[in-house]
């Protein structure tokens, strides 16, 4: 999954027409603009809090690094809406986080952590 999302992200970097820099929740005219903004801010606030306290703090070692790599992809996404310059910069940071997550995922598959907690 990480490799697929990274490949799609690299495709978006190479072909900017495929890049999406909008809000997560859009209304296409069905909802008032203020409600869409409130929904997006609320969703991202819950996602940031949940991402940090449930996923990142609940892991140790390489698993934590994997989660940090993935969450750079999600947690920085609201910054894309600030303008085209931010979109490009955040996309590069996101892809770097996904590269880190992919390398860590491969290392976890090749050499899984010891479940017993012993150092042997």
Image (spheres, rainbow, N blue to C red):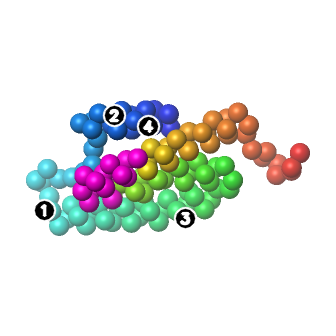
For label 1, the crowd category at 10 Å Cα-Cα, with few meaning under 14, some 14 to 19 and many 20 or more, is few
Q: Which of pointers 3 and 2 lies earlier in the amino acid sequence?
A: 2
Q: Secondary structure at mark 2?
A: helix
Rendering quarter of residue 20: top left
According to the picture, the residue beneath numbered tag 4 turns out to be 5
Q: Nearer the viewer, mark 2 or mark 1?
A: 2
Q: Nearer the viewer, mark 2 or mark 4?
A: 2
Question: Could one spot residue 103 in this view of the protein?
Answer: yes
The disc at residue 53 is: 3
Q: CA distance from mark 2 to mark 1?
A: 34 Å
- In the depicted structure, whether residue 40 falls above or below residue 89: below
Q: Which of pointers 3 and 4 lies earlier in the amino acid sequence?
A: 4
Q: Which of pointers 2 and 1 lies earlier in the amino acid sequence?
A: 2
Say whether marks 1 and 4 touch (CB < 8 Å).
no
Residue 110 percent across, percent down from the top left: 70, 33
- In the depicted structure, whether residue 110 falls above or below residue 88: above
The disc at residue 14 is: 2
Q: Secondary structure at mark 3?
A: helix
Q: CA distance from mark 3 to mark 4?
A: 24 Å
Q: Nearer the viewer, residue 18 or 23?
A: 18
What segment carries the magenta color? 79-92
């Amino acid at each position: 999954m990480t490799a697929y999302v990274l490949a799609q992200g690299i495709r978006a970097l190479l072909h900017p027409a495929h890049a999406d820099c909008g809000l997560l929740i859009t209304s296409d005219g069905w909802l008032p603009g203020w409600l869409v903004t409130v929904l997006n801010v609320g969703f991202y606030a819950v996602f940031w809090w949940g991402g940090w306290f449930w996923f990142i703090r609940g892991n140790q070692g390489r698993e934590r690094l994997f989660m940090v790599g993935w969450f750079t992809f999600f947690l920085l996404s609201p910054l894309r809406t600030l303008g085209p310059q931010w979109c490009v910069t955040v996309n590069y940071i996101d892809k770097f986080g996904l590269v880190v997550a992919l390398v860590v995922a491969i290392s976890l598959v090749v050499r899984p952590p010891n479940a017993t907690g012993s150092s042997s």
